[in-house]
Image: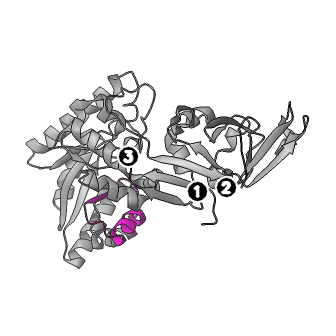
Amino acid sequence: MSNLTYAEVDLSAIRNNVKAIRKRVGEPVKIMPAVKANGYGHGAIQVSRACLDGGADALCVSSLEEGVELRDAGVDVPILTLGCLPVNAAQAMVDYGITSTVCEIDYANALSDAAVRLGKTTLVHIKIDTGMGRIGIRPNDTLDFARTLAALPNVLIEGMFTHFPCSDESDRSFTLGQIEAFRDTAIRLKRAGIEVPLLHTSNSGGILAFPEADFNAVRPGIMIYGYYPSDEVARSIPIREAMTLKTHITFLKNAERGTSISYGRTHVLKRKSRVATLPIGYGDGYPRLLSNKGEAVVRGTRVPLIGRVCMDQCMIDVTDVPGVGVGDEVTLYGGGYDFLSVSHIAEKVGTISYEVLCNIGQRVPRVYFNG
C-alpha cells in the first residue's frame, strides 16, 4: 500500500460497545445503531457487520443510497432511513426492502403506489417532532396522519419515533418533556386502534441518561464507535474507541533556530530542531484548525504539530524523539492516548467528535482488525 496514512478500525471495540448497550437496555429492547455517513467515517459495511455480530437488531442510515450500499453487500436485516426522501425514491425503497421514515403524505402515497405495483408491503416509521425542530409531524397532528397512513394499501406502520436534541446535557427538563409528549402520542394512537409495534426515542445521550425512554427500541450513534456524546452526560456504560488514525514520516530534516515552518510562517523554530513531514493534511480531513496546536506520538513520545496544516502534508517537531527516522509510525488520533482522543481533538478545534470522524476523507484507507 503506497498510502502511508490510514485509519485502523478495531471491529471488536464496536462489537463490545454494542454488547455493553445490550447489557444496559436488556434483551426485549431492539438496538438499531446509526451507521450513516459511512459508519461515522469508520466504514458502513464493516461497522454494520460488527454491530450485528454484537447483537444489534436493525440498522439506521440517512438515505436510499446508504441503504442500497448495505443491501448490495448482503446485509439483510431491517434498515431504516432516518431522513425525508423525495417521491422518486419510493419505488427503490420498496424494491430493496428498506424501511422509510414518513412525515409527508405525498411520499407515503408514492410508497403505497410502488408497493402495489411491485406486489409488496412496505414498512414505515412515523417521525414526530417533540422538540428537535427538524423534521416530523407535530404530536397533536400525529393521530390524523397515522389514520391516513394506515388506510393506504400495502403500507404497514411498523414504528414511531422522535429525536432528542439535548439528552446529553445536565439539564434534564426538556428531554423529560419530550418523553412525556411522545408517550402521550403513543397512547392516543393505541386508544384509536392503531398498533405501532416499535417505539424509539433514545440516541446515545438518551441511552446513557434516560432509561425511562427505552420504550422497545433505541438508536445508539456515537457510542458504538467509542465516544460519549458530551462531557455532561453520565458515563454509565463502558465503551472503547474503535479508530486510530496513523501515518508515517516521509521526510526528516535538521533545521536551524529561526527557521519558519509552513504557510504564513506562523511557526518559527526557537531552537535547532529535527522537523518531520507527514503525508496528511486537510485534504484528508485532518483539521487545519489544528495548526500549531495539534499533537502526535512518535516512538512513544508526545510531539507537537508545528506550522499550518497543508492540504496534503503537515509537520511535527521530533527533536526529542530518540532514534527517529523516515518511515516511523505516527499516531494522530486514538491509540489509547487520552490527549489524542477524538473527543479531545474536537474540543481543540471547537467542534464535536462526530464531525472530526465524518471528515476523515475517502482517500484515507480504513484498515480493519479484530482485537
Q: Is residue 146 magenta?
A: no
Q: Identify the residue position indicated by label 2 in the image.
A: 283
- Residue 43 placement (x, y as % from top left): 45, 58
| Magenta stretch, residue numbers | 62-88
- Residue 332 placement (x, y as % from top left): 60, 44
- Verify CB contact (< 8 Å) between mark 1 and mark 2: yes
Label 2: how many Cα within 10 Å (few below 14, some 14–19, many 20+): some
Q: Is residue 67 magenta?
A: yes
Position of residue 30 in the picture relative to residue 358 (left or right): left
Write the residue at 24% across / 51% down. 55
In the foreground, 174 or 349: 349
Label 1: how many Cα within 10 Å (few below 14, some 14–19, many 20+): some
Element assignment for label 3: helix
Position of residue 321 in the picture relative to residue 188 (left or right): right
Q: Identify the residue position indicated by label 3 in the image.
A: 13
Residue 166 to residue 35: above or below: above
Marks 1 and 2, how far apart at CA: 7 Å
Q: Identify the residue position indicated by label 1 in the image.
A: 361
Q: Which of the two discs, 2 and 3, labels the residue nearer the N terminus?
A: 3
In the foreground, 226 or 230: 226
Marks 3 and 1, how far apart at CA: 22 Å
Q: What amino acid is at disc 2?
A: Gly
Write the residue at 18% across / 60% down. 156
Q: Which of the two discs, 3 and 1, labels the residue nearer the N terminus?
A: 3
Marks 2 and 3, how far apart at CA: 28 Å
Q: Is residue 63 visible?
A: no
- Residue 342 placement (x, y as % from top left): 53, 39
Q: What amino acid is at disc 3?
A: Ala
In the foreground, 287 or 110: 287
